[in-house]
Image (cartoon, rainbow, N blue to C red):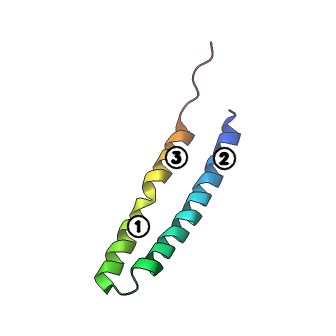
Amino acid sequence: MPIRLKKLIGTFLLVALVIVYALVASIVAVAQLSQSGPWVHFLFFLLSGLLWVLPAMGIIKWLILEPPPKG
């Protein structure tokens, strides 16, 4: 796969990941945390704010992998 195409796909994947993840985290927060205290909100948003990094690291790792040598 050409490197430019790979970077384009990776860029779209990262943007889509952030958008979908933010929507899902917000929906969960509204549905589950409405009666919770401020510390529960803080911990939820702290953890969910850091958790998106794991799938993003997988996408970035895929982006920087060298293609196998031909021949």
Image quadrant where residue 2 sits: top right
Badge 2 local density, few (<14 within 10 Å), some, or many (20+)?
few
- Inter-mark Cα distance, 1 to 2: 24 Å
* Upstream in sequence: badge 1 or badge 2: 2
- Inter-mark Cα distance, 2 to 3: 11 Å
Badge 3 local density, few (<14 within 10 Å), some, or many (20+)?
some
For the point 36% across and 71% down, the residue is 46
Looking at the image, is mark 3 or mark 1 nearer the viewer?
Answer: 1
- Quarter of the picture containing the C terminus is top right
Location of mark 3 (residue):
60
Query: SS for tag 3?
Result: helix
For the point 64% across and 45% down, the residue is 7
User: Is 50 displayed left or right of 22 in the figure?
Assistant: left
Location of mark 2 (residue):
9
For the point 51% across and 68% down, the residue is 24
Q: Amino acid at mark 2?
A: Ile
* Upstream in sequence: badge 2 or badge 3: 2
Relative to 10, does residue 39 appear above or below in the rendering?
below
Location of mark 1 (residue):
48
Relative to 33, does residue 16 appear above or below in the rendering?
above
Image quadrant where residue 16 sits: bottom right
Q: Amino acid at mark 3?
A: Ile
For the point 31% across and 86% down, the residue is 37
Q: Nearer the viewer, residue 29 or 31?
A: 31
